[in-house]
Amino acid sequence: MRDVLSGAGYQIQTVFDGRSGIQIAENKPVDLVVIDLLMPGQDGLETIQQILKAKPDLKVIAISGGRRGGAMDFLSAALKLGASRTFHKPFNHSDFLNVVHQLTQRSSSTT
């Protein structure tokens, strides 16, 4: 995802666990967070809850792979917690970039 987003011209910050992501989202200007729901230390659902509690208007894309039924349950839960969009891995990079563009355009036009 890092290569796809940076290749499209987005400035990104990569972290490898939910707690680090929360610290960045709370302390730096961020337009969008992309969260894998299965991460070490703290899962993506808990991370989404904490990030959106601190910044309720922040756009979040949740992604998950694994077994389709299980991943879909996680993705549905992410939407209920406030994720803006979800993607099941593997997914089409073009579709993903279109959603990233839509979400970041909305957030930059409202600030």
Image: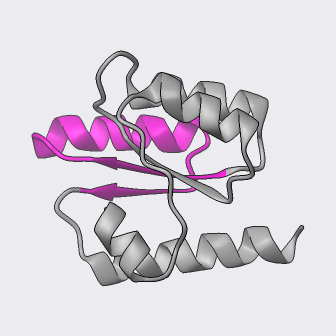
Based on the displayed image, in which of its 4 quarters is residue 8 positioned? Answer: bottom left
Based on the displayed image, in which of its 4 quarters is residue 69 positioned? Answer: top left
In the picture provided, is 23 more to the left or to the right than 14?
A: right
- Where the C terminus falls, by quadrant? bottom right
Q: Residue furthest left?
A: 67
Q: Is residue 9 above or below residue 2?
A: below
In the picture provided, is 37 more to the left or to the right than 71?
A: right
Number of numbered discs present?
0
In the picture provided, is 109 more to the left or to the right than 41?
A: right
Q: Position of residue 96 (x, y in %)?
A: 38, 73
Q: Nearer the viewer, residue 41 or 94?
A: 41
Q: Which residues are magenta?
A: 59-88
Q: Position of residue 59 (x, y in %)?
A: 64, 55
Residue at image coords 47%, 39% = 78
- Where the N terminus falls, by quadrant? bottom left
Q: Is residue 43 above or below residue 36?
A: above
Residue at image coords 23%, 40% = 71
Residue at image coords 49%, 81% = 9
Q: Position of residue 109 (x, y in %)?
A: 83, 77
Residue 48 visible in this rendered orientation of the protein: no
Based on the displayed image, in which of its 4 quarters is residue 80 positioned? Answer: top right
Q: Position of residue 3 (x, y in %)?
A: 30, 69
Q: Is residue 24 above or below residue 14?
A: above
Q: Nearer the viewer, residue 12 or 97?
A: 12
Q: Nearer the viewer, residue 54 or 21?
A: 21
Residue 65 in magenta stretch: yes
